[in-house]
Amino acid sequence: PSGFVESTCHSRIFWMKLNKLLLQGKFFQLEINDPYAGPVLLDEKLASRCGYVLSEDVWGNPVFRASVLGCHVANEADELFSLTVNIKVSSFSSMRAAVTYTYPMYCSYSSWASREIVCEENYMEVSVRTDVPAVSNDYTVAWMSALPETQNVAYQLWQLVFVSPSGRKTITVSDAAKLGYSFNNTLSRVYLRAPYHTNESDVSVVSGVNMNMVTSTSMYRQRWLLLLIDTTVSCPVDGISFTDTTLTWTVPSVIPTLVVQESTFLSKTILMGVDGRVIVNLEEKNYLLEHNETHIRVTVPIGAEGGKLKSSLSGGVYGVIYSIDLLLEHTWTDADWQTTKYTVIKSITTPFMPQIPSVINNTLPEERLFNVAFGHFLPDVSLVAIAIGNVPFTLREAQHHGFKIYETLFSNRTKGFVLEVSFDDPYVLKEYVNRNETKYTLLVNYSMSVGPEMMPYYHSAEVECVIADIELPEAVGYCDEENLYLAIPTFGLHQYWNLYLGSKPLNRHIALTNGYLAATNSTHLILQIPLFAVGVIYEEVSFQKIKARFDVALRKVRTMETLQMFSVRCNFNSSAFIICHPDGTIMVSAQMKTIPAIDMSKTKLRDSSCKPREYNEEHVFFKFHVTTCGTSVRFEGDHIIYENEISYEKETLPGRSTPTITRDPDYRLTVLCYYRAKETLVLGAFASDPSTSPPFGSGTMVPRSNTAAYRRIRQALNVVSRVSKDESFTEFYEPNMAILKRPVEPVFLEVELKDESPDAELYLENCWVARSLDFNSTPRWNITVDG
C-alpha cells in the first residue's frame, strides 16, 4: 500500500522503514530473498551473522538495515548492490493468511576506503581492500609468528586465525560461520562480520570506553601465493552518560588495536548523523560535536529535534524517556592503512526521568471561577476522567455537569489540561474564614492514560482561593420607655456565626430565661430586652436616670472568635430601681410615699453615716458598696445575697420613766442584691471588654410596714462574749487582744447572758466584726445575720 515502505541508502547501508500506522493490530515478518535459495526468514542469529538489523526508530516504526556486504546482497563490481525483502503481514500471530509484499532495494557505493569498519547494534564488520601494500616492518614479528599456521593453510581456501587472551585459534570459514561469524571476499575486498561478545573476542578499555575487540588474520594460499590480511575489528559498547538536561556519547579518537603506529595517525573528518542522515549544521539542532587527541564527544540536549520524548511511569510516578538514533563517522589515515572509515550506529535511550506534573492556579477570583492547568505532559498523555470532591466524572459527564475541560499548549511542545469550575458549584468546599472571607477549596483527582501502552496514571490536586465575599451584619438598636431593642440580620446566622451573651450562646432558652422577647421576619431577628433584665449593662446611674446598654457578640461558629459587638444604648427615666453592679456597687432609687410624709434627707442605711446621695419629696437615691454601710451577706443555694435597709428614724426625747432605746424605724425598705456564687466581683465600675465582664446582679426592694408587731423594746443586759481558741471552748483569747484569722478559718464565739431575770432570754440575731468598740462603727463585716 501507498506509504507503507520507505527506503534509502546511507553510508553503504540499506535503510528500510515501515509505517507503524498501517501495521496497527497486525503481525509481520521479514524474509530475505536469496537469489539462489529463495526466501530466508530473518531471525536474530541470521541478522548478526549476515549484517542485518531489525529494530524500531524512536517513533515506533519498524526499521530494517542491511550492510551492502550482507549475505544475500547481489553485488555488481563492488559498486552496485541490491537486496529484495519479503514483508509478510497477517492478522494472526501464527502468520496464517499472511499477505506478502515484495520490496527490492538498491544501493550505489563506490568510494570505498582501504579499510571500512561498521559498528552496528548487533554486529561488527570490517572490510579490507585486497590490494593493500605489504606488511610494514613493525608487523613483521607478529606476522612471522603466524607463518607456522600458514603451512597448514588448505590450498585455495580461506582460513581465519583468532588471537584472544585464551590463545590462538585457526578455523575454516565454514567453521567460523557455525560460531556466528561471516567471512567472504568480493571482487576487490575481504570482509569479516562478528557478533558482539563471542568467545574469540576481548574487552579492553580505551580512554575510559569499553571496546569489544576481535583480533583476527585472514589467510589464503594458492600455489606460490600466500595472502595474509589483517581483519581486526573493535567497537565501543558503552561511553554513554546522562545529566538532567543532556546525553553525551563518547568514542575514543584513537583505537590502538586499529592504529598500531599512533605517531602516524591523522584524523581527516568527523561527521555526526541522526537517523542515518549526516547533520551538516549541528548548531541549528543544538547538537555539540567535540574532539581532541583522545576523545570524540557528542552532546545532545534531551528533547532535541531528531529524537523523541516518550511518557512513562515508574512506581506510579510520571516521567519521560528520550530516545535518539545517532551516527558517528570518523575517517583517518595512518602509515599502515591509506584510509580507514570508521562508522558507529548507536541507538540511545535515557533512563527514566521523573517529571512531576505541576498544578498551575490561574483562578479568577473576580469571576468566582477556578481555572486550573495541569501539566506539563507530552502529546502521548490523555485525560480520561476526573473526580471533584471524590465524586467521579467521565469527561462527558463533567462537561454535562457544567465543568469546562480543554487542552492548552505550552512553549516547550508540551501540553496541559485546563479545568474550570465555579466557586458556587456544590462540589466545591466552602469555609468561612477571617472576618468576612470565604475559602473555596477545589479537590481534583485526575485519571490519565500514559503512552501508547495506555498506562493508567492518577494525580490529586488541591486548589484554594480566599475572597472577601461575605458582608458582616450590622445591627440597629432603639428603645422605648421600658425596653431596649436590637434588630439583627439573620443572614449567616448559625452558618457562619452565632450570637453570644457574654460567654453563653444567645439561644431561645437563654432568651426566655432572661425575660427577652425574640421575633423574626424574613430578614431580621428582633430582640426586646426589658430595662432591668439580666444582661443589661448600666453605664451611668443617677437620681431617677439610667444610661443602659445591651451587648450581643457576633462570634464565628468554628473558632468562637468575636467579630463584632452589637450594642444598643439608651437613657431611661425611672423613679424606682435597684442596680447591683458587677463590682459590688449597689445603686438604689426608692420611692417612699408615707402618710404623713417623711423627711427624705433623714433616711439612712444600716450604717447611719450612709446618707442619700440625692433626694426630693418622694424619692431617695443611695449608692454604696457591698462591703460598706452595714451591708450583710449570706449564701442561699448558688447565690450570694447582700442585704441592707433604707430606714427613717424619728427623733425621740428622753422621758421621766426608765429610758428606752428603740432601733425600729418608722419606715424600712429592705434592699437585696443577688449574685451568682461562681461570678467574681471585679474592682472598678466598668470592664474594658464587655463580652468578658461578669454580669450585673439582680436586686429587689422589700418595704416593711411600721406596725406594733415589729416593734421591740430593748434594754441593756449583762452579756459577756469570748473567743475560744478551738472547738473545745476550754481556752479563750484575752479580752481586747488582736486575733488574726484567715478568711477560711472558723471563729469559735461564746456569748453568755449573766442576767438573773427569769423573763430574760438570749437570742443570737446579728454578729459582726468592726474596727472599733462603737456599736455603730463602720465598716462592718457580718458573721451572722438574723441568727
Image (cartoon, helix red, strand yellow):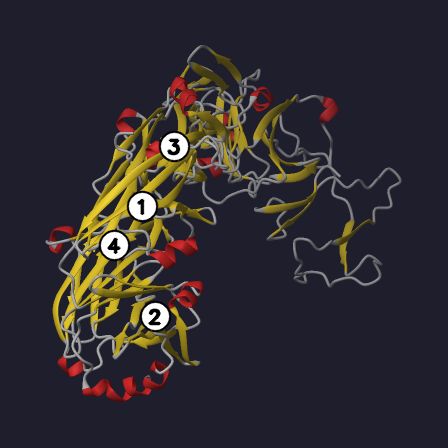
Observer-side mark, 4 or 3, equals 4
In the picture provided, is 47 more to the left or to the right than 712? left
Q: Secondary structure at mark 1?
A: strand
Q: Secondary structure at mark 4?
A: loop
Q: Amino acid at mark 1?
A: Val
Foreground tag (2 vs 3): 2
Find disc 4 in the rendering and name its residue: 68
Residues under labels 3 and 1: Cα distance? 31 Å
Mark 3 / mark 1, whichever is N-terminal: 1
What amino acid is found at the position of numbered circle 2 in the picture? Answer: Leu
Q: CA distance from mark 2 to mark 3?
A: 66 Å
Q: Which of the marked residues, 4 or 2, is nearer the chain's N terminus?
A: 4
How far apart in space, not on screen, are marks 4 and 2 (Cα)? 23 Å
Residue 773 appears in view: yes
Is label 4 in contact with label 3 (beta carbons under 8 Å)? Answer: no
Q: Amino acid at mark 3?
A: Leu
Per the image, the residue denoted by label 3 is 383
Marks 4/1 in contact by CB < 8 Å: the verdict is no
Q: Residue furthest front?
A: 223
Q: Which residue is mark 2?
A: 157
Disc on the earlier residue, 4 or 3: 4
Q: Residue furthest right?
A: 758
